[in-house]
Amino acid sequence: VQLQASGGGLVQPGGSLRLSCAVSGRFFSINVMGWYRQAPGKKRELVARITRSGTTTYADSVKGRFTISRDNAKNTVYLQMNSLKPEDTAVYYCSADIRPAITSSEYTYWGQGTLVTVSS
């Protein structure tokens, strides 16, 4: 199982970016998918998460600016980031709670991280 994140880059304050993360490989099911971020010198923190049925949770710092969504047919999760601020600068990681086989437990898999820099 692999998670491949894309969409990071440099953007000016107030701008927008859309991150994508696709799950590939053999697995039975994907449950919760999410995005986390880690700024230099800080701990990794939850940005947003979404259940298979579409229930979402957001960090207070991004509510109203970021939107998480997923396409279950494509095994992909997205993060639309609007009104970006310099404090949003971080490496963004996607995660997915995956059951590799019908008889196995659920494990959390991580993408490789994509850098988002918000600066003028």
Image: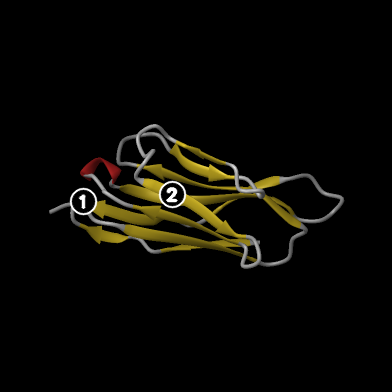
Answer few, some or many: residues within 10 Å of disc 2's Cα (few below 14, many 20 plus, some between 14 and 19): some
Residue 89: % across, % down:
28, 47
Q: Residue furthest left?
A: 120
Secondary structure category for the residue under label 1: loop
Residue 120 image-quadrant placement: bottom left
In this rendered view, identify the residue nearer to me: 83 or 92.
Answer: 83
Residue 115: % across, % down:
34, 55
What colour-coding does the image apply? secondary structure
Residue at (61, 48) in percent of width and height: 54
Q: Earlier in the sequence, mark 1 or mark 2?
A: 1
> Mark 1 highlights which residue?
14
The answer to whether 96 appears left or right of 84 in the picture is right
Secondary structure category for the residue under label 2: strand
* Amino acid at dot 2: Thr
Residue 55: % across, % down:
59, 42
Residue at (40, 55) in percent of width and height: 80
> Mark 2 highlights which residue?
67
Cα distance, mark 1 to mark 2? 15 Å
* Amino acid at dot 1: Gly
The answer to whether 75 appears left or right of 58 in the picture is right
Residue at (53, 43) in percent of width and height: 49
